[in-house]
Amino acid sequence: MPDPVKKITLQNGAVRYRTVVDAGRDENGKRVQLTITKDTRKEVLAERARIVAERSAGTFIAPNKITLGEWLDQWLEYKQRDVEETTIRTYRLALVHIYDRLGHVRLQELTEDQLQACIDEIVATGRRKGGQPGTRLAVSTVGGIMVRLREALGRAVVRKLIPVNPAQFVRVSLADKKTDKRDRDKPKPWTVDEVQTFIRGLEQDRLYAPLLLSLMGLRPAEVCGQRWTDIDLQLGVLDMTNTRTMIGNVKVLEKDAKTAAGERALPLPQWPWEALKKFKAQQAREKLAAGEGYTDTGYVVVDELGMPLNTRQLREHAYRTMRRLGLRQVRLYDARHSCLTYLAVNGVPDVVLAAWAGHTNANFTKRKYVHVAPEDMRAAAAAWDVFHGGDPKASGEKM
């Protein structure tokens, strides 16, 4: 058997030892060979033996020059098989800080320390809009960045581009979490009184029915995606199968429900049911008045000429109404939180709560959407009164 190691004499007279070892095949099936050059024959043979052993064990990682930025591009392309176009855009926006700071670093040279320093910097100076650029970025936002980064690097481990995930143990520091909790104003969902004030102020509004749908737990994209064929006004049932969302607040994207659980049938409460009947009759009158100028698109949320409204237009209409009524401005999506909290506090079973919200996991629904406020705990306070001294009314008379 020929000697796999060759002795090489360099131009300056230095001696090196070199061998070529088969490293398997690349993604395209092309044979990959690695050249090993060391100062001694012993070092060359040891490295050759390591590579052969790791190949046999299935743990060998072939050297490559791909950068983190290039790998993130490949990962996002791979994720397009599984998620919507709007979700890919969200992922790319979440990772823009990583692209900017570490995109040039070779994937195989990326370290946990580099990633931890990057995350610390993003928390401290990552804000780009909605305030003073270069100031602190919300810890929740950074958390989303880390989730996507860990997933992307985990995929690189699966593809045997790197041996371990360097982001696995990267965390936002406890000090940064405390600072964020202390300094950041987090919007609170509407109270029940605020929701009811909004509803009373809408009674004469043309979009009363669609906004009531927002106040029964539907996402804005679900409201805008509703078609009259999805609603049975005889039985009072709404089928949630279609959404109309927006990309970058500019481009409308129509698609099916976000998840399989998002495709659901909901019984209409009495007020939205009656409001939808009146809204359909009003649209019939508007169609008659407009004549040929009317476009019958079949959507529920349309203007006076039948053209569908998008989520931005619905949101802006709601904001104008909030200002007119002197209410705190909250996102329509946050109104969904208020509605689901009300159902939870009033004893709706977890499994029904999750199904109404379009989720598969009831624990996720309660953790993400149920926010118990002091007024929601009045019944608990009354129970404590009974526990401490009997009938609270009787104790009040003694005082």
Image: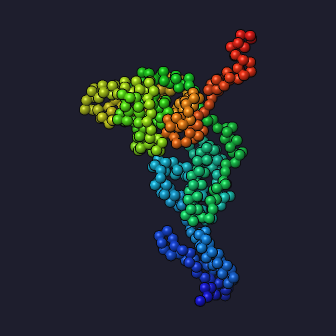
Quadrant containing the C terminus in the rendered view: top right
Percent coordinates x, y for residue 127 in the rendering = 60, 45
Q: Residue at x 72, y 14 (%)?
A: 395
Q: Examine the rendering and report whether any part of residue 8 can be seen.
A: no
Residue 368 vertical placement versus 6 (above, below): above
Residue 132 position within the rendered picture, expressed as x and y whole percent measured from the top left: 60, 42
**Does 307 appear above or below 173?**
above
Of all residues, the one furthest to the left in this rendering is 292
Camera-side residue of 356 and 207: 356
Residue 346 appears at what percent x and percent y? 57, 27
Q: Residue at x 30, y 27 (%)?
A: 284
Query: Residue drawn 28% across and 26% down?
Result: 289
Q: Nearer the viewer, residue 268 or 131?
A: 268
Visual colour scheme: rainbow
**Residue drawn at the location 64% of the way across and 23% of the way down:** 379
Please tell me which residue lies in front, 210 or 273: 273
Count of numbered badges drawn on the protein: 0
Q: Quadrant of residue 44?
A: bottom right
What percent of the width, then of the height, locates residue 159? 55, 64
Quarter of the picture containing the N terminus is bottom right
The quadrant holding residue 381 is top right
| Residue 30 can be seen, yes or no | yes
Residue 250 picture quarter: top left
Which residue, as the protein is rendered here, is positioned at the far bottom? 2
Q: Is 263 left or right of 288, judged from the image as shown?
A: right
